[in-house]
Image (cartoon, grey):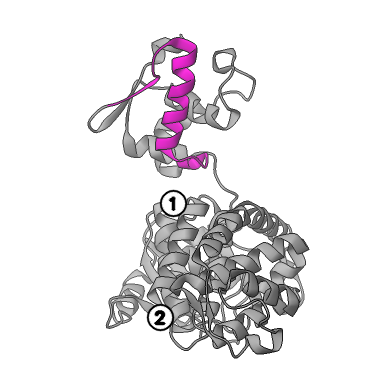
Amino acid sequence: MPEHLRSGDHPHFETWCQLIDRSVTDDGWTIAAVCEFAKIEDLPERKKLTKAQSIDLAATAAHMGFAFEPDPRITGKNYEWDQLVSIFPATEELSQDIASYHAAAVLLELGVGIAAADGQIDDIELGRLTSHLEAQFDLSTQDSARLEHLRYLLAKQPPSDFSAAKKLQKTLSLKQRKLVGEFLVGIAAADEQIAPEEVKALGKAYRALGLSASDLDELLRSVSVLPDETESQESAQTVFSLDLNRINAIMQETMQVTQFLRDAMLADVESDESTPEPDERGKVRIPALVVEKPKTVSPRSAAVATPAAVSDHGDDRLAGLAARLQPLLKAALTQERWTRKALDEIARSHRLMLGAGIEQINEWSYEEFGDAVFVELSDEIEVQRRLLE
């Protein structure tokens, strides 16, 4: 964090709050142009802020308890001078899993581009898209809120150039890009038909992904209840009625998009961290705030979870328990009772859902010790540490 933000109130706090108060839209969102905050911070006007300036603005907002969406610490993209951002209360400094959120945001951007192609964004399509992403990427409460704010911005200014798809062409294999293409077809089909405008947008997205028109035509024919003889040149003029069983199967198949897209974004974050940006004079300087990799423990739960920083050496007591579940159990064993919220934060820090984690650990515990490690009470979770002593 920049030195002047490390302690005390920011000198421009009141001015920021005044700007935020007058930026509330009629439908209750808070939207403002980046340049309005840049002027408060005395940044000179330019078409695009530097990476360091962009990151400093987002960090300043976080210091005052606000979050910006989009956030350059996640996207790696510099702010445009007139770019609109959504402002909302921050419940944590930054996403605990930047790669997962970034991947979800990329798919949201592509999905909204397809959904908006017919001139109106269908609530069914957006709802299906958002719920699918939240579930598949296991987003935290903060990141789910962040995704909603991004969705609002994208719905107001739908992307049409599919620039995100062009970037994926450089980082994903052909097979992976085909799965992304299938995912987009599934989103377009959420209202049980694909209009000619959506077919045209899908074609543009497929080209941006480096996929051929024949790939799209073949997929459209496979999901359509129209006769197979539909020619590719007729596709752009056809409203496709769909086989919903086939569409649901596609959405199940494309769940694997989650992991490889997340891996690609993680590689992007690591690459971005190691590449300092030249300033206006061509000299390289280190940004004021670098993107942090996902932490092992949530900052809010660090006080109670620190003792769980157990040695990486194997623990014979946990033999037979899946490796991915062991960090959660080790953390839980540091005390006898937990609030569900505190234990949930630790589970999420290890990319686990608490309910599923408890169930699987208890299954293992019953087999090993004849009893459950976790006992769920009305508002707390008891840990039977004696079983492992």
Examine the residues drawn in magenta and state their main secondary structure.
helix
- Kind of residue sitting beneath label 2: Ala
Numbered-mark total: 2
- What's drawn in magenta, residue-wise? 348-376
Crowd tier of the residue under label 1, counting other residues whose Cα lies within 10 Å: few below 14, some 14–19, many 20 or above: some
Residue 184, position as x, y percentages in the image? 58, 70
- Kind of residue sitting beneath label 1: Ser
- Helix or strand or loop: what does disc 1 sit on? loop
- Helix or strand or loop: what does disc 2 sit on? strand
Which residue corresponds to the image point at 48% horizontal and 61% vertical from the top-left? 4
Q: Nearer the viewer, residue 124 or 49?
A: 124
In this rendering, the answer to whether 35 lies above or below 325 is: below
Residue 65, position as x, y percentages in the image? 37, 60
Which circle's residue, 2 or 1, is located before the other in the chain? 2
Q: Is residue 55 visible?
A: no
Question: Mark 2 = which residue?
Answer: 32
In this rendering, the answer to whether 296 lies above or below 119 is: above
In this rendering, the answer to whether 314 lies above or below 159 is: above
Left/right of residue 145 with respect to residue 292 in the rendered view: left
Question: Mark 1 = which residue?
Answer: 140
Q: Is residue 155 visible?
A: yes
Return the mark for residue 152: none
> In the image, which is nearer the foreground, mark 2 or mark 1?
1
Residue 123, position as x, y percentages in the image? 38, 74
Residue 369, position as x, y percentages in the image? 45, 11
Which residue corresponds to the image point at 53% horizontal and 30% vertical from the top-left? 325
